[in-house]
Image: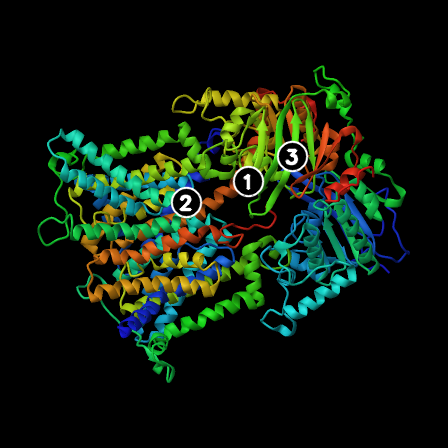
Amino acid sequence: MTTTLILGKRLSFKHIVPFLSGGLAFLVGGIILYAAGVDPLEAYALLIKGSLGTTRAIADTLVKTISLLIAGLAVAVAFKCKLWNIGAEGQLYMGALGGLLVGIAVVGMIPVVSVVIVLIAGIAFGAMFSLVPAVLKVKLGVSEIIVTVLLNFVALLFISYLLHGPIKAPGFLPYSPDIFPESELPILIDRTRLHAGLIIAGLAAIFVHFLWKSKIGFELKSVGMNISAARYAGMNITKSILITMAISGGLAGLTGAVLLAGVQHRLIEGISPGYGFIAVIIALLGRENALGVCLVAFFFAVLLAGSESMYRTLGIPVAFAQTLQALVLVFVLIGEVFTRIHLPRRIKRVNEVKLENHGKQLGAPAERGKGE
Amino acid sequence: MIDFIIGIVASGIRMSTPSLFAALGENIAERSGVLNLGVEGMMLIGAFAGFIGTFVTGNVIIGILFAVSGPMVMAALMAFLSVSLRTNQLVAGLAIWLLGVGLAALLYRLTFGVVTVAPTVPTIPPLDIPFLSSIPVLGPIIFHHDAMIYLAFLLIPLTHIFLFKTNIGLKIRTVGENPKQADTLGVNVNRIRYMSVIIGGAFAGLGGSYIALVTTGSFSEDIAAGQGWIALAAVIFGRWRPFWIVLGAFVYGMVNATALGLQSIGTTIPFQFLLMLPYLLPIAILAVMYKKSVAPAALATPYKRGER
Amino acid sequence: MSDSGSPPLTNSNPSYSPIGTQDNQPVLSMNGITCRFNDVIANNDVHFDLFKSEIHGLLGENGAGKTTLMSVLYGLYKPDAGEIYVKGKRVDIKSPLDAIGLGIAMVHQHFLLTPSHTVTENIIVGLKSPRRSVLLNTTEAEKRILELSRKYGLKIDPKAIVGDLSVGEQQRVEIIKALYRDVDILILDEPTSMLTPVEEKALFSTLSAMVKAGLSIIFITHKLREVIEASTRVTVLRGGKVIGTVMTAETTETDLAKLMIGRSLTHSVDRLEQEIDTGIQKSSNARATAGLATMLELKNVFALNNSGVQALKDLSLTVSKGEILGIAGVDGNGQSEMAEIISGLRKIQSGQVTIDGRDITGMSPKQIREWGLAYIPEDRLNTGLILEYTIAENLILDRWYSRPYSGKIFLDKHEMKRFAEEIVTNFDVRTPSLDIQVRYLSGGNLQKIVLGRELSKEHKLLIAHNPTRGLDVGAAEYVHKQLFKQKASGVAVLLLSLDLDEILLVSDRIAVIYAGTIMGVFDRTTADVDKIGPLMGGYVVEAGA
């Protein structure tokens, strides 16, 4: 919105902040590596090569992008409506569970239909699980932050129980049986792991993009921005909170189902390496719109894929990527402050130039002379 | 049978200690108006710092000093974001949490690499309080613990006195309820908030170091297992008053201890469900008493002199 | 006798007249104070003096710069230019702590108290304990509070919880809070805004007691009557500039009014109505007896407030089509709750609310709006608007779901823009662009956006809650004109206002609310402050009195 005011220049400090923050994060990361006796430049070169250097690498990066994108969208939708859903990880697992149950039960259908049912089951399970904190919030006023976080542990323990017992496949490991092949997401590029989940992720991003342009999206957003104004204006607060959480949980569940149907083809305990938590950072960085989430998700996928490469060759722990991600967030938060300070000044300058034109256009007569 | 119960209660006290430390500290921060969601991250840093300090120097006291300092730095960052920059406190807290998680795991792995047998330090042994620990039933439950628990016992009334009976405590509470009132009476709102958040960090460090130096004698990425979040919940159940917060943390510890106890004597309930209880119970308690809780009025609201 | 630090005794102000003897220096001198906020100059080269034992009224409209000037004195703002001298010495007041150290204390318009703490705790926070103790010493503090309480006739219990006290009692706590810290100069910001007429008189006698004891008082207000009653000298501010300083005994309300707004104060109702192109009758009597249909009726309504306390008690009233019913009352007597139950934002315990013949109990706010309610809320910033939204987005807050602003699924951005342009033109909203967030606009413009939205749809009943609070004269007049337009087109208008002058100016009938009940209803022609005042304070007027 602010770019329309900046005559000609479409850039403002607000757009530079993410890049600056990324740069600072890499700098701090580099210092830590150096202190640990690793050459930062070598490490970062590996990071780029391991994530974008070969077709295989790019495919792997995109595979990670799929999960990060859908999960990021899930959390971003909630955050935009000021619902602090930190439970995406648990909702993801429940979605994977839903997908699994369908995937091992349904057989003999056209693959497309099969896959779609698996994904829908994932969405449903994720949405239902997220309704627990939602109902607690609307009926009892309980803050969703603590509830969603604690439910993560509950979900993971529940899945663990199932994998060691009721849905355990024969064998020693706590794995579920494989889903039927027709429920798997097909591979898009041969000899890579890149699967059709990419299309699903794209659809999810488009869905969220149009959500904010819709009537219902306007209501959900407004309830988040200012609950008393929304209420006063006649919006339905309860309905909005429930729908927002359901969409958020549903998308998180979708992430799980896609992981299941696209990569693992069965449910295992570590099916998600914390995607639900990384999604929190992604959402905080890209929360305003779907495109932002896409870009950040890709960037973080690059970090994750690259960090695996750094680990293999230099032994740098994967936690390095996690730390970098958190650092980017911290620097962005600091950087945001400067956009706050600059903004009013820019408006003032534009005032001086544009006021006359708009005044004439909008018919605000300067001649009336009423005090303002 | 009675011995079994005594064992469980004593164990319950031990299991409530980490979140108790963290909750007492978070209470001070929240009383000044700052909601710090980063407690879990700070506890992990505290656990790591405490572990590495003890591992390298062989001295537990140095370890604890490390454990307290690391989180204090993170808390200062949290205060910088929340008080000076007036960022959304929820967002800042989440950033601190995730930074703590990542950094603790990263530093541990960088230091020790991948090992088949995790490095350990000797845990702090329990200390018998002479005479008192011989009292039947109560003795083993209360007076046969390590020194850190006795410290925790001491901190409970100390934080109460600090908040309610000292001048600075009144300043903290007023800053948390009506910062403008405090400001117009000459209280430095920002300084009070920084101080309170950093104290909170120190306590979180104590909580983290307890897990590393008493409970396990080692460190792992998920060693906190949500106790930072439990601490946040305990502050709410405890209505921001130290004695009630203790009760909240204790309930958590007891449920945990009971679950483990049941496991050890063998029960048909799958252990995962027992492990779920310590997470489900706080949710249930919050559901029941949330409406009645009255938070400090200015909690999570940034303050700037002159703003309407 | 002059040293380089002394300010000159006279200034360029033509109405200035020093009091006291020749070597009676002012205890306070503010010279050339200028304060700029972005584009607005809140204080423009202001000179202000205060002598010992005087009650100096600082008079001006909302936005004239009075509170800014005193905030500078109290260390809350740093002026862009100017100097301050206290007791002849040049000082630099960087924070409230400095001001307190100089013997300056301020009682704010909106009390700065912590309801959950005791009176004593509220008063002593920030002070050191005697004998440098770390511990809180409430016993000694309570003794001193009781002493001050006796000395100035401000009855208060130091152990009481502030949240349990009445507004008048809370103000006493505020005053003692100020007096507790060795004070010579006391600033009071709009002290009577929350008081009943009786409490007001008590306050004024307290002020007299204080100046007799040697205090010097500055009294910020926009009410002419108060200044005449309570002060010994008056400085008038307008648009950030000092217009004049006069001895109260040598001036009148009319003179002050002219200074304060630069023109005659009371725009008569008749003159305003003439500006409206309708053919309504000028006589209010005719309106009152015309037997117009009832649009809104509240019958024996009981309702609780957010703290579970009885806010509305057996409240009954009616508003007819084409009339303005003004509700007079001190803040906190049920006005907000009344607006909320009519608009569906609050549940009633018992009783009935009828709009245009339909019982609206149980209807949602959306349904009530659709049935024909327009509502200008008290808090336009936080309730009436979403500050991060644009004008267009704010204008459809109550109708986003209906055509033409949205289709089956999506919002219609073109329609929204067209609507925004229409409202901006019709309601004269000054903005550099339609795309900026409304939080950058001024208070008057924000209110126009709210008005534009509320008045631009079909409605039968309009609730206007403190519609002109914080607005300058021009904007307030605009709002009043809109209210008259509404009345003329047959809408029933319920006006809730804390400004008794506004109520007397605009209403056809006036109802007085106290503790959630209607104490009495007057026709405009028979209403005056003497009758309404006591009712506002809860005193039941004897029949025939």
Q: Secondary structure at mark 3?
A: strand
The quadrant of the picture occupied by the C terminus of chain A is top right
Q: Horizontal and vertical percent for residue A217?
A: 40, 31
Marks 1 and 3, the one that precedes in the sequence: 3
Residue C508 at least partly seen: yes
- Residue type (three-letter) at the residue carrying disc 2: Lys
Using the image, determine if residue C33 lies above or below residue B117: above
> Does the residue at mark 2 contact the one at mark 1 (Cβ under 8 Å)?
no
Q: Residue at x 77, y 51 (%)?
A: C203
Name the residue furthest left: A171
Q: Secondary structure at mark 1?
A: loop
For disc 3, the neighbor class at 10 Å (few under 14, some 14 to 19, many from 20) is some
- Residue type (three-letter) at the residue carrying disc 3: Ser
Quote the CA–CA distance across marks 2 and 1. Answer: 24 Å
Q: Secondary structure at mark 2?
A: helix
Is there one chain holding both mark 2 and mark 1?
Answer: no
Residue A12 at least partly seen: no
Q: Which residue is mark 2?
A: A137
Q: Horizontal and vertical percent for residue B108?
A: 28, 62
- Residue type (three-letter) at the residue carrying disc 1: Gln
Q: Horizontal and vertical percent for residue C114?
A: 60, 55
Q: Nearer the viewer, residue C14 or C184?
A: C184
Is label 2 or label 3 in front? 3
Q: Residue at x 24, y 70 (%)?
A: B120
Q: Which residue is mark 3?
A: C316
Quote the CA–CA distance across marks 1 and 3. Answer: 14 Å
Q: Which residue is mark 1?
A: C349
> Which chain letter matches label 1?
C
Quote the CA–CA distance across marks 2 and 3. Answer: 36 Å
Q: Horizontal and vertical percent for residue C36?
A: 66, 42
